[in-house]
Every structure is written in structure tokens, then in C-alpha cells.
Amino acid sequence: HGCRRLRLRPRRAPAGRPQPPLRLLLPLPLAPHAHRPRRHPRLRPLRRPPTHPNLHTLAACLHPSAASSSPRRATRINAAAASLLSPLTASSPGLSRSFPSGAPGAAGRRRTLVWFRADLRLHDHEPLHAAVGASSSLLPVFVFDPRDFGKSPSGFDRTGPYRASFLLDSVADLRRSLRARGGDLVVRVGRPEVVIPELARAAGAEAVYAHGEVSRDECRAEEKVSKAIEKEGVEVKYFWGSTLYHLDDLPFRLNDMPSNYGGFREAVKGLEVRKVLDAPEEVKCVPMKNVLEPGDIPTLGELGLSAPPAMAQDSKSAAGSNLIGGEAEALERLKKFAAECCMQPNKAVKDSTQNSIYGANFSCKISPWLATGCLSPRFMYEELKKHAIRAIPSKDGDGTSDAGTNWLMFELLWRDFFRCSSQRSTALHRRRPKLHRPLVAHPPLRLLEYARS
């Protein structure tokens, strides 16, 4: 059904020999408005004559591997056959498919772009770990978004000079760590939805791996990057790796999350923390010679910021200016903090407020490295657990770390609670219908009359 019978007029046969007409059935696409033809009786298969001067040439044009005895005659019929077969190829998208440089299904032979964001570390980095195992070469990238260094709608600076300086140190430390393992870090200044597709196209990347964020601005950037990169036929995958407990391990859906910290803590009680992923020993990057330039790390002035007078004169006089960003500094701070905590007496039972912190200088002071992703909360939990940090006894009073909860565990759980709450509010905001016109609290009288009419 849906076939049209074409009658091809062959060349004239020699005198004295009858030449039957040649019938050829081709499944030509019908117009959408054309009526469906009636069901014809079953057609008998056509019998070809034993000797036919033009059948060999027609078969040659339909089958490219067959040789033609007459090139001139084959050229004419090849053009006719091409005109007949061209609608089939044009109307069937599955007949012409273009694959990327790497063969589809060939695991471990593709190039992957790893987009570093608020995860400036190599340890416990799931996108990097997955890319190393599934790709032959990587392209680590960090993008300084100018929108993160501008003014907020309220008129405040989105990023201050101290935080920006800490971020610059962290990016520089990440580049040194990658270069020590045979790789490098590509640094750019621009919008991620523009920079990431350009770098992926230039490097021939077939996938983009990154950690997902929870705030609304970062999630909007993820959506824009996904829309821009999927047009190039590149896979985009975001991982969850900014909390102590993984989002998939929570015993509730994000919409059913408890609204207070007490309910959240009771719900996650008894969950196991996932194992920490080791940092890769070697990072094979895409060859950047004559293709990509690593780029220079910008300065505060290039980001539109100026160093405050206290920071410009004496870097140690301002609060927070002595903090050095980077994974190496974070691991060193964690090591010293764990050693100092082991020397502190266990005051959990004697103290009146169990929520107070008994650590080095009454604070762990590792929040900046957790915020920029230089330190993983799971790695921090495991390291402190190895050093036998004292635990707050449970209601049973046994005082063991298995029955009780570590005081630092409370702080990490608070962090998980706020990040999951931000993720839930961002997800609800996406599903909320957009109002194209602002609501009017007290509409004018003429609008009420118009609505009543």
C-alpha cells in the first residue's frame, strides 16, 4: 500500500524482437492530503525476460557496487534513479545520521569537558571521577561569570574583594594541582552559556560534566548551558556533591522534606555517608597546542573590583585577609584542626549547651573552603572520624560515637538542611507560573467596571 506504479519506457528493441514494458514498484511518500488508495488485489511478481539489454544497467545504478558495461548509458539512468530515490532519503531522517568523531558506544574514547564551579578540588569530585573513567582525555574549565561580580538588585556587591581574592587563590591552586598530574585548567571570563559551548566545540568534546547548584541564579545558568550545548549534540550531566548526605539517599522526596531542622535531623538519623572518592593520580587533558590556550587568571581589577585600603596596605590587618584559598590549604587546616581537637578534653556532658563548639579557637574556621568546594564535607567527616573526635552522648548516655552524634555532625547537618531547602524552593519556583503583568493591590474603579461588564 502507498506504492505507485511507474512505467519506464526502455530503449527501442531490435527489429523482430518484441519488447515488453518494464514495471518498477517504488514506495514513494504520498502527500498528506492525498487519499489512501484502495486495496488492490495481490499482484503477481513480474517475470524478467532471460535476456534484456537494459536490466544490467538499471541494476548497476541501483546497486553502486555492481559494475556497468556501458558508462554513458549508466550515467543517464543513474541520474534518473537518483531523482527517484532522493525523496525517500529526504523524507526519512533515519537514513542519514551524522555521528561525532568518537564512534557511538565506544566507551572510554570520547572527550569530556569538566566544568568546575563551586567545587574547586580534586578529591571527592564525582564529575571528574566519572570523566576520568569514561573518557580518553579531559578539558577542565573554570569560568568567571561577570554577573557574579556585579551589583545585586538591592544595590549590594554580589562578591566582595576579600571573597574574590579567596576565589582567585582557589582557582590558582586547582590549576597547580592539575598541572602536577599532567593536566591543566582552562580559565575564561564570560557567560558560561557562551563560553562552555565554544570550548566544547573547539575541543571536540562529546560530554559536559559538572556539579549542580541549588540557588536560583546558578540553576538558571545551568539551564542556559544545557540548552546551548544540547544543540551541538553534546551530552550534559550534573552531579550532586555539595552535602554530607547525597540527595538520592534521603528517605523522603524533596517536596516532602521537613520544614524544620529537628524533623530533618530525625529523618536522616541512621543514614550512612557515602564513601569519599579519591583524587585521580593522572589527568589526561585534551592537547591544547594550537587549539586552546589555558588563559590567565584575572585580577581584581579585571573583575571590576578594587582592593580596599586595609587590604592594599597590610594584608594581615583586615579580618579574613589572611585566609588563603585552595584545596592544599584546606587539607592542611583540616589536619591541624583535627590534631587540636584530639587534645581537647571531652566537655560534652559537663557543658550546659550541647550546641556550643569545642574546637580549635572555639571554631573550626573551615567554612570558606566548604563554600568554595575546596573541601568536601564527606572528606571532612571521614577525617575527623579517623581522629576520634569526641561525640555528644545520646540520651542513653553510653557516650559512643556510634550511639551519639558528633558536634561537628550537627553543623554539617545544618548545612545540608539549608542546601536542600534552597534546592526545594528553587524547584518550586521553576514550576510556579510566571505573571506577565504585576498584580494590582487596589485596582482603579474603571478596571472594576470593565471587569463587571
Image (spheres, rainbow, N blue to C red):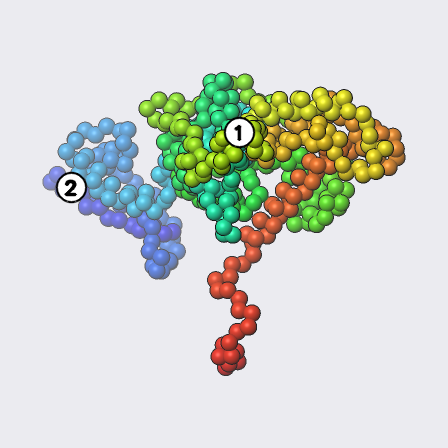
Which mark is first along the chain, 1 or 2? 2
| Front-most of residues 37 and 439 | 439
Residue 24: which quarter of the image? top left
Residue 368, horizontal then vertical, whole percent: 60, 33
| Front-most of residues 267 and 303 | 303
Residue at 42% in and 39% down = 304
Please name the amino acid that badge 1 sits on: Ser
Identify the residue under disc 2: 11
Residue at 14% in and 33% down = 72
Residue 396, horizontal then vertical, whole percent: 88, 35
| Front-most of residues 283 and 347 | 347
Q: Which mark is residue 315?
A: 1
Please indicate, yes or no, whether residue 403 appears anywhere in the rendered image.
no
Residue at 75% in and 22% down = 342
Front tag of 2 and 1:
1
CB-based contact (under 8 Å), mark 2 and mark 1 = no
Residue 82, horizontal then vertical, whole percent: 25, 41
Q: Residues within 10 Å of mark 2 (few under 14, many from 20)?
A: few
User: Which SS class for mark 2?
Assistant: loop
